[in-house]
Image (cartoon, grey):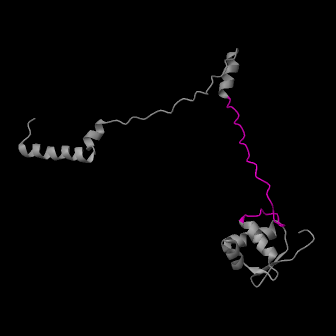
Amino acid sequence: MRLSKPAAKRAEPEESKKATTGFLSQKEREGKTMKISKPAVKATEVEEPKAKDPKKAAKAMLEPEPEPEPKKKAKAAGEQTPFGTRIGSSGGRIDLLLIQSKKGVTTQELAEGTGCTVGRVLAHLRHLVHKKGLPIVAEDGVYTHTPSKKT
């Protein structure tokens, strides 16, 4: 097939465009295939020993191997507040401010003093009352802790 001069001129800018931009046309992309690399096989994989009895060997291959239990990370004991919360945590800072206040504190004061949100303060106070069973009293938005023999 012979190209006329205008068609030949149109073909040249595409080639120069490809050379300058590095992009391939759709026809060129369709002709290219992507190479997908396969993951390397681990050298630590070991073949299972062959059993003498073929029935036992088949049964062993069908049964899944038990997965090892994940190791639990041991947490450092650390120091705790009288309420049982770790010192340095947001809950621990809330506990210490609550204990140190003589007249009581509001949630806003606790939030500003600990660097937590008001929602976090309320959630921790709720935890102390319902889960830990501590005598924390709220009167007119002021929370106070009445010490007992337990704490």
Which quadrant does the C terminus fall into? Answer: bottom right
The residue that appears at 23% across and 47% down in the rendered structure is 20
Q: Which is nearer the eye, 57 or 125?
A: 125
The residue sitting at the top extreme is 52
Residue 84: say if magenta.
yes
Q: Position of residue 100 (x, y in %)?
A: 81, 76
Q: Position of residue 96 (x, y in %)?
A: 78, 71
The residue sitting at the right extreme is 149
In terms of image quadrants, where is residue 119? bottom right
Q: Which is nearer the eye, 58 or 48?
A: 48
In magenta, the rendered stretch is: 63-89
Q: Which is nearer the eye, 52 or 11?
A: 11
In this rendering, position of residue 138 left or right of residue 36: right
Residue 126, relative to residue 23: is it above or below? below
Q: Position of residue 6 (x, y in %)?
A: 8, 46
Residue 59, relative to residue 127: is it above or below? above
Numbered disc total: 0
Q: Main secondary structure of the magenta part?
A: loop
Which quadrant does the N terminus fall into? Answer: top left
The residue that appears at 63% across and 22% down in the rendered structure is 47
Residue 131, relative to residue 61: is it above or below? below
Residue 7, relative to residue 104: is it above or below? above
In terms of image quadrants, where is residue 143? bottom right
